[in-house]
């Protein structure tokens, strides 16, 4: 398949590009490099430095390159920022996504793969999270993702575009060879911040909340390797051949891990102590989020390879050791 990876210079997108190549597909990357990194994409992959909201330009790229499938990883992801600047999130995550879908419609491209999030479930009453739980996001970021899911459902019904939606849990880790990995600016995620605290690149890690109703008082999350996520996106292609398709899957390991367990694992993998201090809860953090991934396993024949957090953190550590400044571009 010829696949346009929108946001292909970002963290998850760049790993998906690698997995597409490994599976024998032909990836093309579109990224405006606001958050993405040019160095995350190999030089031999066609690269379009373009905005996903530029309908005309995107339609031309789709037509010129006979694109079969569009994958969309180009959303803004900072939950806290979305609370303070909701329009920025609605403009990019919903408005620009509509322009992208219009461009697909112009060019007659009918297959779409969309990165959604477990944040669309809000604060669930039951765990682990199954796909048919009510979706009630508690922040604008989650709301923007849910809006797009609804748009995609309507487009499937009308027969215009078939979609696969993946609701991610905590994407983590890096390519096995350490050549690409996580480089966000600003960085807010636990595993890279714990590694930076261990190496002394950042101050002590703040443990956000130690009084949650969990076994050790810290939040439980489901950390899923970025390559495991990527492989599910490719396993769904067959289903997209059918018109009127809208499928959705949770992507997690199904295993809850606490913040303290992550810090212990980072210490074990790096051999360095992780300086940490207890801090108040972070706004908007549900106590526990972990997936029931039965549906993805059954229907996609998908199995996460990194089932223990130490093997996952080992890949992140390899990347950070070889790239202590990340990609080293001006974004940080
Ligand atoms: N966390 C923390 N200190 C940090 C960053 C994160 O204690 O400096 C906690 C956070 O409160 C959450 C978990 O680590 O319980 C995972 O947070 P992250 O931001 O990595 O992902 P999220 O689950 O918010 O998508």
Image (spheres, rainbow, N blue to C red):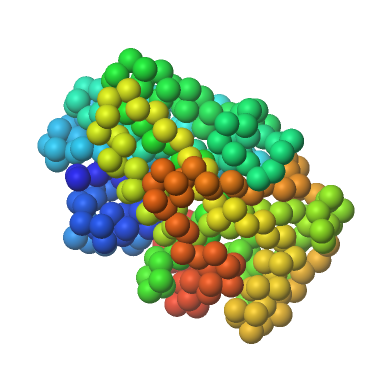
The one of 16 and 103 positioned closer to us in this rendering: 16
Q: Position of residue 299 (x, y in %)?
A: 41, 43
Kindly tell me whether residue 16 is visible in this rendering: yes
Give the quarter of the image for residue 141: top right
Give the quarter of the image for residue 277: bottom right
Residue 71 shown left or right of residue 284 in the figure: left
What residue do we see at 84% from left, 50% from top?
213
The one of 150 and 244 positioned closer to us in this rendering: 244
Which of the image's four quarters has the N terminus? top left
Q: Position of residue 67 (x, y in %)?
A: 19, 38
> Residue reaching furthest top?
158
The one of 134 and 181 positioned closer to us in this rendering: 134
> Residue reaching furthest bottom?
271
What residue do we see at 59% from left, 46% from top?
292
Q: Position of residue 87 (x, y in %)?
A: 55, 27
Residue 318 shown left or right of residue 288 in the figure: left
What residue do we see at 46% from left, 32% from top?
92
Kindly tell me whether residue 313 is visible in this rendering: no
> Residue reaching furthest front?
298
Above or below — where is 29 with respect to 202?
above
Q: Position of residue 232 (x, y in %)?
A: 40, 50
Residue 61 shown left or right of residue 70 in the figure: left
What residue do we see at 34% from left, 43% from top?
236
Q: How many marks?
A: 0
Above or below — where is 311 with respect to 300?
below
Above or below — where is 31 with respect to 154?
below
Give the quarter of the image for residue 55: top left
């Amino acid at each position: 398949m010829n696949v346009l990876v929108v946001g292909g210079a970002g963290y998850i997108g760049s790993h998906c590009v690698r997995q597409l190549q490994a599976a024998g597909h032909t990836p093309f990357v579109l990224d405006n490099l606001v958050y993405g990194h040019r160095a995350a994409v190999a030089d031999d992959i066609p690269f379009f430095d373009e905005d996903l909201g530029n309908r005309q330009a995107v339609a031309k790229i789709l037509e010129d390159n006979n694109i079969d499938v569009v994958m969309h990883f180009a959303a803004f992801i900072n939950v806290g920022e979305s609370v303070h600047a909701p329009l920025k999130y609605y403009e990019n995550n919903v408005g620009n996504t509509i322009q992208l879908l219009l461009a697909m419609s112009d060019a007659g491209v009918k297959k779409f793969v969309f990165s959604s999030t477990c944040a669309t479930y809000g604060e669930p009453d039951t765990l682990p999270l199954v796909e048919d739980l009510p979706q009630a996001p508690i922040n604008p970021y989650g709301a923007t993702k849910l809006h797009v899911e609804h748009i995609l459902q309507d487009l499937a019904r009308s027969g215009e575009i078939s979609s696969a939606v993946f609701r991610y849990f905590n994407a983590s880790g890096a390519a096995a060879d350490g050549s690409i990995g996580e480089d966000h600016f600003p960085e807010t995620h636990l595993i890279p911040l714990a590694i930076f605290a261990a190496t002394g690149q950042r101050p002590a890690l703040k443990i956000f909340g130690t009084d949650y109703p969990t076994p050790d008082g810290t939040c439980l999350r489901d950390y899923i390797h970025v390559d495991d996520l990527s492989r599910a996106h490719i396993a769904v292609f067959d289903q997209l051949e059918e018109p009127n398709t809208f499928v959705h899957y949770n992507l997690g390991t199904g295993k809850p891990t606490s913040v303290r367990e992550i810090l212990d694992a980072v210490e074990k993998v790096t051999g360095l102590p992780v300086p940490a201090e207890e801090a108040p809860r972070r706004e908007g953090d549900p106590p526990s989020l972990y997936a029931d991934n039965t549906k993805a396993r059954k229907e996609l024949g998908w199995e996460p390879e990194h089932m223990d957090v130490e093997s996952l953190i080992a890949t992140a550590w390899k990347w950070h050791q070889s790239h202590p400044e990340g990609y080293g571009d001006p974004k940080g």
